[in-house]
Image (tube, rainbow, N blue to C red):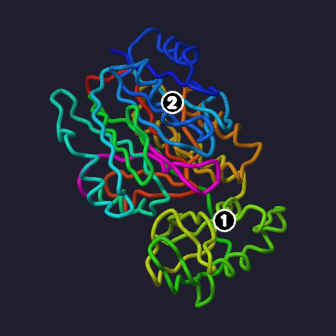
Amino acid sequence: MLTQVACLRTGRATPASLEELSSLLGGASPVFVAAFASPAAGLEETLGALADRFPTATIVGSTTSGEFTQAGDGSHGVALFALAGDFKVHAGIAEGLRESPERAVAEALEGQPVNVAGYPKRTAIVLLDPMAGRGEEAALILATNLGEVPLVGGAAGDDLAMVSTSVGLGGRAASNAIVVASLYSKAPLGVGVCHGHQPLSKPLTATRVDGSVVLEIDGRPAWDVWREVTRERGRELGLDPEANPGAYLLRFEAGLRVGHEYKVRAPLAPKPGGGILFATALMEGTVFTVMESDPTAQVDSAVAAATAAREALQGAPIAGALVFDCICRKLILGDRYAEALAKLSVELGGVPLAGFETYGEIAMNSGDMSGFHNTTTVVLAFPRSWSPTQ
């Protein structure tokens, strides 16, 4: 059985748009559908419409800060990804991520089989609410629970309002929640991940932290330090930290040194008293640098992620791809964002793809130190057919 992928970007999940999605699959019934919906489009309404139209499919979704397919990107709409083929899919959703990521992960995994006969490879797709501030913990707990299972996914967005984000399963959407969908296949799927950031500042230290809020950097209010070290570059780019603090912070990330590379962390919003809310917790005493990237590096990093996903399939033709791409990259790329999407698709063979602009990305393969990323492109590629040697 050949794998088929259909991707569609639309204003709303109407009967006509869902019929178009079905026709793109050539009449095949999807086993898995992902819906990425702006808060303006209504995630729960979108999931409900999909559940009615495709009752045998596992349907997951997330709110976004932008939606895209291989044809380009937009906002305040919905991007849909539908997968048909020889897969088995199990999924779960759990609330209470902020209070106990361990309990939430266990609840989301409850009932999912460790193995499925005839489908030896398992890939976990993860969607979570970043406002819970538990992205890093959730990724590491999942990795511990699942062992060698690759993880991919993204943290929900809310059109840069930085107020409330949601994820969903079936016809249900929830905040402070996590969704884990396990795809069981006969051969591995292709995973690629890459970011294009470089240090902007000297090393800085988070000297006072409260969970995912950094209160002080080098003994001073964190927001004051952030504006100070980015002021010159921000002026060059025409950015005003007071006009849209959330967008400004996402333009300048935090980089944690890991060997010769940097793990990027996203600041989301300033807090009363001068603290900065991050997408995941930082430990007190963490040393980091403020990072930046230019558009060319961001285009190149998207292509590099696609290359890694393609090469992981060892020459198998690709049917399509899911892509989780940080909103920070859209802020950096501006009008060149469509160029990055187009080049990513070409690198995969001109295949259909769909995804959303996230507040954090999840990607973990065996041996990776951490599965939660920021300002990063994560690509999950699906082979068109299984080789007997795979």
Q: Position of residue 197 (x, y in %)?
A: 62, 61
Tell me which amino acid carries mark 1. Leu
Q: Position of residue 83 (x, y in %)?
A: 42, 24
Q: Is residue 322 magenta?
A: no
Left or right: residue 7 versus residue 311 is right
In what quadrant of the picture does the C terminus appear?
A: top left
Dot 1 falls on a residue whose secondary structure is helix
Q: Is residue 346 above or below residue 158?
A: above
Q: Which mark is residue 381?
A: none
Q: Foreground residue, 7 or 58?
A: 58
Closer to us: mark 1 or mark 2?
A: 2
Q: How far separated are the C-alphas under marks 1 and 2? A: 30 Å
Answer with the quarter of the image where residue 52 lies. top left
Which residue sits at x=84%, y=66%? 236
Is the C-beta separation of discs 1 and 2 under 8 Å? no
Q: Point out the stretch of residues depicted in magenta.
A: 144-167
User: Residue extending furthest bottom?
Assistant: 219
User: Residue extending furthest top?
Assistant: 27
Q: Foreground residue, 387 or 222?
A: 222
Which residue sits at x=26%, y=36%? 121
Q: Foreground residue, 325 or 189?
A: 325
Dot 2 falls on a residue whose secondary structure is helix
Number of numbered tags placed on the structure image: 2
* Residue receiving disc 2: 46
Q: Is residue 366 above or below residue 88?
A: below
Which residue sits at x=44%, y=58%? 372
Left or right: residue 20 versus residue 61 is right
- How many residues crowd mark 2 within 10 Å: few (<14), some (14–19), many (20+)? many
Q: Which mark is residue 249?
A: 1
- How many residues crowd mark 1 within 10 Å: few (<14), some (14–19), many (20+)? many
